[in-house]
Image (tube, rainbow, N blue to C red):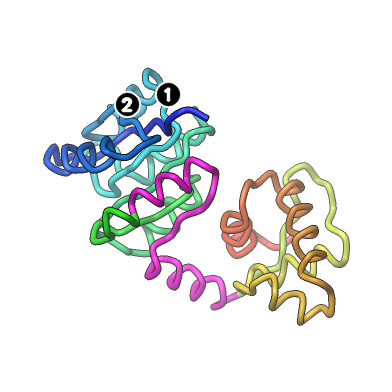
Amino acid sequence: MGAIRVLLVDDQELMRQGLRKMLEIEDGIEVVGEAADGEEALLAAAECHPDVALVDARMPRMNGVELISRLSARQPGVAAIVLSTFDEDDYIFGALRGGAVGYLLKDCTPEELVDAVRRAGRGETVLASPVAARLVAELRRAPAEPSLPRDGERLSAREAQVARLIATGASNREIAARLLITEGTVKNHVSSLLRKYGLRDRTRLALHLKHAPEP
């Protein structure tokens, strides 16, 4: 596998320079482009074809949330990570719903950032601890009934049970204990739900089920 190609998107040049120097010394990571706002980032992404985009939440002309939504539509293969000083709900949930694979705070360590880039490059979801805690709290607050998958394919009774528990923020282990089934069976149901809803990871599935209208 080749180097992970990274696009840096931040309106502060000093921040971009610092990120570039931090990432370029790492084996297997290559910074292939920079942009100072969302509009520049869309153009840069089309030219440099990054694997991962590090995106600031607040930028002029087009903020990070809007950029990620557009980037996900145009280049779904780009894994976008928000790197922000703000852990406000609008940014966190907006970015994740828009297609971000991660949300980090700018007070993270260099090691955490590099690890996040590598994990995002492998298709994993990356959330800072305070963000993950906020997400779980939101999911647990008001569970939603699962809506129908977008292709009209209906859920089985067991899948609907698993979906409802995912919407509460329950882990696979908790779901297995609640339904008296194995964790392996839960994972199979989660994989089926991801396929039926056309989603690529459990975090997006939980968000979708949390906020989707009832069928």
Q: Position of residue 174 (x, y in %)?
A: 69, 78
Q: Which mark is residue 49?
A: 1
Q: Which mark is residue 32?
A: 2
In screen coordinates, is 91 left or right of 182?
left
Kindly identify the residue that appears in the image at 43 percent across and 30 percent down.
3
Say which element carries label 1: loop
Q: Could you tell me which quadrant the C terminus lies in?
A: bottom right
Kindly identify the residue that appears in the image at 82 percent across and 65 percent down.
185
Residue 165 colored magenta?
Answer: no
Say which element carries label 2: strand
Q: Are marks 2 and 1 in contact (CB under 8 Å)?
A: yes
Residue placed most toward the observer, 104 or 166: 104
In screen coordinates, is 139 left or right of 89?
right
Q: Quadrant of residue 27?
A: top left
Mark 1 neighbour density, 10 Å: few (under 14) some (14–19) many (20 or more): some
Q: Position of residue 172 (x, y in %)?
A: 69, 70
Mark 2–mark 1 Cα distance, whole angstroms, equals 8 Å
In the image, the segment drawn in magenta is 113-142
Q: Quadrant of residue 158?
A: bottom right
The amino acid type, in three-letter code, at marker 1 is His
Q: Position of residue 113 (x, y in %)?
A: 33, 52
Kindly identify the residue that appears in the image at 44 percent across and 52 percent down.
102
In screen coordinates, is 138 left or right of 43?
right
Q: Position of residue 108 (x, y in %)?
A: 28, 60
The amino acid type, in three-letter code, at marker 2 is Val
Residue 131 colored magenta?
Answer: yes
The extreme left residue here reads 14
